[in-house]
Each structure stands twice: as C-alpha cells, then as structure tokens.
Amino acid sequence: MFKNKSYIGISLVILVFGIYAIPKIVDRIQNNNVVKSDRLDKVNSAESNDESLIKIGPAPKFELVNQDNVKISNEDYKGKVYVLEFFFTTCPSICPKMNASMLDIEQGFFGNPNFGIVSISIDPVHDTPAVLKTHAKFLGVKSSSWNFLTGDKEYIYNLANKGFNLYAGENSKVNGGFEHSGLFALIDKNGDIRCRKDDFGNPILYYDGLDKKGVRDIQQDIKVLLNE
C-alpha cells in the first residue's frame, strides 16, 4: 500500500513538472532560442576568432643590397604586406620550384602598391647584385617591389637562422653546396610575422613554398592582410 502511494506521489511530481516545463521548452524551440546561452555564445565567439591570422611577433630588421645595388631594409616595406624567402641562384634542387611559386604570387598581386616580395641569397659570394639582376630577368620578374638581396654572409645566416628561424647553411656534401628551407614568411603592414593555424589549431609559422596548397594558402592570407 505504501509503495502504491509512493508511485502515485512520483507520478504527480512528474505530471506537475511536465505541465510547467514542456510549454516553455516548446516555446523556446518555436522561437529558435534553444541554442542561445551565454556559454554557447562565448564558444561561438572563440571559434570565429580562431579563423583570423595569428600574430607571431615582429619580423627581424634587415638591411641589405638589392639587384640594382641599392640598400633595402625592412623600413622600405613599412605599410606593405610582403613575403620573404631565403634562396640562391645556382640552387639545383628546391629553388626553381620556390621561384615558380613566388612568380605565381607576384602575378596574383602585380600592380598592388601595398604588396612586395623579398628574396635573400644565402650564397652572397656568388650572388652579387649583377648576378641577382640577371637572375631576376631570367625569371621574368616584373614587379618593382620584388627585391633580390645580398650582403655579408654571416649577417644573412644570422638573419635566417636566429632572426627568422628559417634554416640556411653550407654543406659541401649536398648538390649545390648549400642547404635551406623551402618556407615563405608572411609579414603584415605593421612588420609582424603572421600565419594561419593547421588542422589541429596550432600556428603553422611559415608557408610551404614547394607545395600548391601552401602557395594557395599564403595567397588567400595575403588578401586578408591587404584588407586589414
């Protein structure tokens, strides 16, 4: 008998709750308010922020000589979005592919006064301004904002390895005598290195200049920075 009374009591509680709560739930569904809450709003806001480009920090300062024997520094790119690489003209391996990728990037933004490219030689003994000028003509470079730079070797290696953390070094055992990464750095109008995130939410830091996807990604992100 007591059990029956307990069941009756529980049933009455459930019935009262249903009468009170169900209309409110239905009303929220009808008014599309089910997913609206402070916590969910914050999650949605964080997700939208994740889509923006990450600011890594200030790009290292530099001052070198270009293919026209003119001093060029990071200050010449102030207010511009630019892509930077390390290469050398006699490279028999990855440089031709990097050059082709840069040409695609140049063509995509040709004529835009707020965009530029910097290519720094890691073989400055051979890559004099005259050699760099010949190389630029060979590639078919048209943009006046694409500078091929050369200078003191130790200065350039420090800039690559300690400044940008983009590996460059001499190695007599490899074809061409030098090693370097095939990565491109993306710098915004304020002189900060910028990048997107990978599929796991980690900053990629630099873009793969040897990969079609890497080139496509950096082109998309250049457009974003030009509009900032």
Image (cartoon, helix red, strand yellow):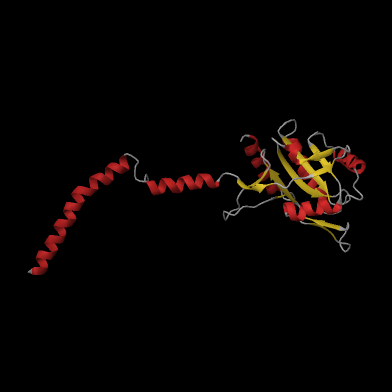
1 or 102: which is nearer to us? Answer: 102
Could you tell me residue 7's position as x and y percent?
Answer: 14, 64
Picture residue at 81% right of the left edge, 54% below the top? 157
Q: Position of residue 112 (x, y in %)?
A: 72, 31
Asked if 1 appears above or below 205 in the picture, the reply is below
Q: Position of residue 62 (x, y in %)?
A: 78, 45
Q: Can you tell which quarter of the image residue 192 is in?
A: top right
**Count of numbered marks:** 0
Farthest-out residue, left: 1
The C terminus lies in quadrant: top right
Q: Nearer the viewer, residue 36 or 189?
A: 189
Observer able to see residue 153: yes
Q: Dividing the picture into quarters, in which one does residue 133 lie?
A: top right
Q: Quadrant of the N terminus?
A: bottom left
* Residue 215 seen: no
The residue under the point 70% across, 46% down is 59
Horizontally, residue 180 falls left or right of residue 28, namely: right
Residue appearing at x 88%, y 58% in the figure: 177
Q: Position of residue 45 (x, y in %)?
A: 47, 45
